[in-house]
Image (tube, rainbow, N blue to C red):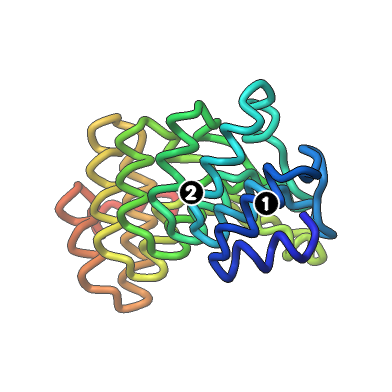
Amino acid sequence: MPTPFENAVKESNKKLVHDLLSGSRPLPIDIRNEASQTGLMVACAFKAKETAEEILAKYQELENHTIEVKDTLGLTALHYASHSGSLECVKLLIEHNANINATTNKNETALFLATEQNHLDIVEYLAENNCMLQTKAVDKKLEIFSTIEEYTALFVAVRNNFVEIAKCLLSHLTRTKELNPQELNQLLVQAVEEDHAKAATELLINGANLDQREGI
């Protein structure tokens, strides 16, 4: 979207936003900014739920394309909403059938980005709506050394000592039985090494055991 639209959204200028979207000469549906971001992405990035609703209503016949289109980094509108911490926009997009498990160029899901930014409410909402919990994001920065690291949302929560998010994810992973004992023990080692006592406690409660570290 052109700068005037982005500025209007950022400054919460609802009248100008409306004029740009629905005035006598509205912006075309496929217009993007230099980062290949759509108007919906911009709205979600700035937590502008009303603007997101207007865009979805205006382009209802192209709803799926509007929601699922990606920018140059592979982010969808849902990624932007999750990263910015806008639970309202996340709910709006999911209600309009956004792909809850869409991945970026680094294989990051909305859950992963919400975890990175410590947005507990969004993590809880995504988990309760049956998102994939064990998708592994790839750290491509290490490819220069011929090394590729993969991280789950739970790993990020433990590494950053986001205890409530770790607790939430562990609860759902225990229920779905997606986390094996070796993974739990690896995470426990990570928590202990970084002196994250509360995260380590949650892992122990959920079955991790420092005395059973095969493969670590």
Q: Amino acid at mark 1?
A: Asp
Which residue appears at 24% of the width and 60% of the height? 164
Residue 4, position in %: x, y? Answer: 75, 64
- For marks 1 and 2, give the one nearer the viewer: 1
Query: Residue at (24%, 37%) from the top-left corner?
Result: 174
- Image location (x, y in percent) of residue 70: 72, 42
Q: Residue at left 55%, top 49%?
A: 51
Q: Is residue 41 left or right of residue 82?
A: right
User: Looking at the image, can residue 105 be seen?
Assistant: no
Q: Position of residue 113 (x, y in %)?
A: 51, 55
Q: Which residue is mark 1?
A: 19
Q: CA distance from mark 1 to mark 2?
A: 14 Å
Read off the residue under disc 2: 50
Q: Residue furthest left?
A: 205
SS label for mark 1: helix
| 94 sits left or right of 23 in the view | left
Q: Label 2: few (<14), some or many (≥20) within 10 Å?
A: some
42 displayed left or right of 86? right
